[in-house]
Image (cartoon, grey):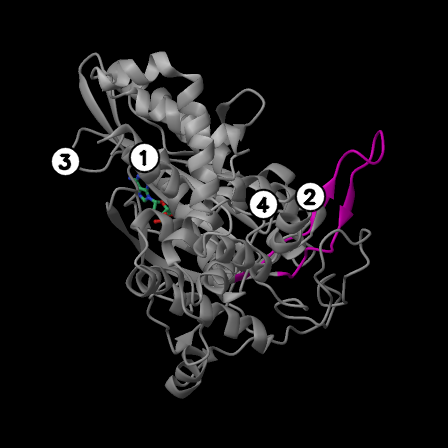
């Protein structure tokens, strides 16, 4: 819970989100036009999307299934009877003069999303509803000095609007919520979750209250397209509202925009100026009626979702809550871990996948799909650690070379002669040489300076080029030094 301290006492943030998620579908919600990102303007526009007279919408069954899948992933109620309405407003990028959107009777009702706030703390955020709607086109103001152009490629693309209860209490929770929604839709394959391409955007509603008291008046910050911006906008907005309230003023309910360059929100329109959309059921579309059997059939095809996968990784592999959380944040990463951990020391696998492997990927800005080291190759390296062929220390160097060259761990160890020295006779010789060269320190050690033990180990490891088996070094050294 984020508390803001004002001169007159504490204030608590209350936040609710409306997330617009573009449905992953090759064609639009009511037409067969294509939906791919980045196409040349107006190359993906059917007569329906351009609202030519007499054109009629036809529901895309696949988009409906995607919405149901998402609703099930949000543990929400699927409404077997839902209705598409016309939301009327006038704008250059809206050729119909209305948007088809579900209003009073959405396809998905109440659900819940669990947030992982670290250190075992979880938060349950209520989902109010999910409804389907069409996207509008886009006005282009930078193509001509005195005219605006319109690109209708997005016109008619299916969006899911996921509305949360005002249950969020801090920018950190909002970030966790957006990441969780993104992870869930990516697992389900119902939205690609790419906020920088506009596939996921959020309207952020913020109000302030005295802790535990009634909700205050909210402002809605429109169209946020990154998690970082959402956090910045909330922090700015919370401070702005507290300043007004502390001055004895009242918050005016309004829609605001976030200016990411200035880090500020500014007023777009007040509640009085807000549109009267004159919603009514679209007479071109019948109510959408589903059967429980259809919903059940879709449910049967759902993949294992992040919460279930996390619980299973902890139970099956004995890894920690934090490690499991990192792994399940991305399905491909979790799969990679499971492939590495299979029939191996799973904690060693988790440490290596999360530490060295993810670290190297991040540094190289690479995805797993194009990683030069695959799960088998990383597993091969871990096998060499487990059977004492190399130490964990040397393994890090070997991994670096694997990542650079794509060669196998065994080949690199062979080529560079990195095989661990486990021959106790050879180790004993190295130890004797180190002790002979440091007689003064041996005296000090015997005189009680225990810390010098580490120094001797370090010298022996150095003399061996890091290749002496550390366990053997410790044992023999201890025997030689008598204690
Ligand atoms: P509208 O249709 O005007 O957008 P809704 O009732 O659908 O209004 O609410 C939209 C969003 O605002 C929801 O996500 C909800 O959780 C959030 N919200 C409602 N009241 C508050 C409040 N007092 N403070 C913060 N968020 C709120
Ligand atoms: Mg709204």
Q: Is residue 89 left or right of residue 48?
A: left
In the image, is residue 240 part of the stretch drawn in magenta? no
Residue 443 in the image: x percent, y percent?
Answer: 29, 15
Pointers 1 and 3 in contact (C-beta within 8 Å): no
Residue 404 tag number: 2
For the residues carrying marks 2 and 3, which lies nearer the camera in this image?
2
Residue 258 in the image: x percent, y percent?
Answer: 52, 30
Q: Is residue 40 left or right of residue 235?
A: right
Question: Along the polypeptide, which appears first: circle 4 or circle 1?
Answer: 1
In the image, is residue 144 part of the stretch drawn in magenta? yes
Residue 212 tag number: 3
- For the residues labelled 4 and 3, the Cα–Cα distance comes to 53 Å
Q: Is residue 396 left or right of residue 116?
A: right
- Disc 2 packing (10 Å; few <14; some 14–19; many ≥20): few
Determine the secondary structure under disc 1.
loop
Decide which of 334, 397 is in the foreground and name it.
397
Decide: is 469 above or below 312.
Answer: above
- Disc 1 packing (10 Å; few <14; some 14–19; many ≥20): many
Q: Which residues are magenta?
A: 133-157
Residue 470 tag number: none
Residue located 64% across and 57% down the image: 369
- Disc 3 packing (10 Å; few <14; some 14–19; many ≥20): few
Decide which of 238, 323 is in the foreground and name it.
323
For the residues carrying marks 2 and 1, which lies nearer the camera in this image?
2
Residue 170 tag number: 1
Decide: is 296 above or below 280.
Answer: below
Mostly what secondary structure, the magenta segment? loop
Location of mark 4 (residue): 399
């Amino acid at each position: 819970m984020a508390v803001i301290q004002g001169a007159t006492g504490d204030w608590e943030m209350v936040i609710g989100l409306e997330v617009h998620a573009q449905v992953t579908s090759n064609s639009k919600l009511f037409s067969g036009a294509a939906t791919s990102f980045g196409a040349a303007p107006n190359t993906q526009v059917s007569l329906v999307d351009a609202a030519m007279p007499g054109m009629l919408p036809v529901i895309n069954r696949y988009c409906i299934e995607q919405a149901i899948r998402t609703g099930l992933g949000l543990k929400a109620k699927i409404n077997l009877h839902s209705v598409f309405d016309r939301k009327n407003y006038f704008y250059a990028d809206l050729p119909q003069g209305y948007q088809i959107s579900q209003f009073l009777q959405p396809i998905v009702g109440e659900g819940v999303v669990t947030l992982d706030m670290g250190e075992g703390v979880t938060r349950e955020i209520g989902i109010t509803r999910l409804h389907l709607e069409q996207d509008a086109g886009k006005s282009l103001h930078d193509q001509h000095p005195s005219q605006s152009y319109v690109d209708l490629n997005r016109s008619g693309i299916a969006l899911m609007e996921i509305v949360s209860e005002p249950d969020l209490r801090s920018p950190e929770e909002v970030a966790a919520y957006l990441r969780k929604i993104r992870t869930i839709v990516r697992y389900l394959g119902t939205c690609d979750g790419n906020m920088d391409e506009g596939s996921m955007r959020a309207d952020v509603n913020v109000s302030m209250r005295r802790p535990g008291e009634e909700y205050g008046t909210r402002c809605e910050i429109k169209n946020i397209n990154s998690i970082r911006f959402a956090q910045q906008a909330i922090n700015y907005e919370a401070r702005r509202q507290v300043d007004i309230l502390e001055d004895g003023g009242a918050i005016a309910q309004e829609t605001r925009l976030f200016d990411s360059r200035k880090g500020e929100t500014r007023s777009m329109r007040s509640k009085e100026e807000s549109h009267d959309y004159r919603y009514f059921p679209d007479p071109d579309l019948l109510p959408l009626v589903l059967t429980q059997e259809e919903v059940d059939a879709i449910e049967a095809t759902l993949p294992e979702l992040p919460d279930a996968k996390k619980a299973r990784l902890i139970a099956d592999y004995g890894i920690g809550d934090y490690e499991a959380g990192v792994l399940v944040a991305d399905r491909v990463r979790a799969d990679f871990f499971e492939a590495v951990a299979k029939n191996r020391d799973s904690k060693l696998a988790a440490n290596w996948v999360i530490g060295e492997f993810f670290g190297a990927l991040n540094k190289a800005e690479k995805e797993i799909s194009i990683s030069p080291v695959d799960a088998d190759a990383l597993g091969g390296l871990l096998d060499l650690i487990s059977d004492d062929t190399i130490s964990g220390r040397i393994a890090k160097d070997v991994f670096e070379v694997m990542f650079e060259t794509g060669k196998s761990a065994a080949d690199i160890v062979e080529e560079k002669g990195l095989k661990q020295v486990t021959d106790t006779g050879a180790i004993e010789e190295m130890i004797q040489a180190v002790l002979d060269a440091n007689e003064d320190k041996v005296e000090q050690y015997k005189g009680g300076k225990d810390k010098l033990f580490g120094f001797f180990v370090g010298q022996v490891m150095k003399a061996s080029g890091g290749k002496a088996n550390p366990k053997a070094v410790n044992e023999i050294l201890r025997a030689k030094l008598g204690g």
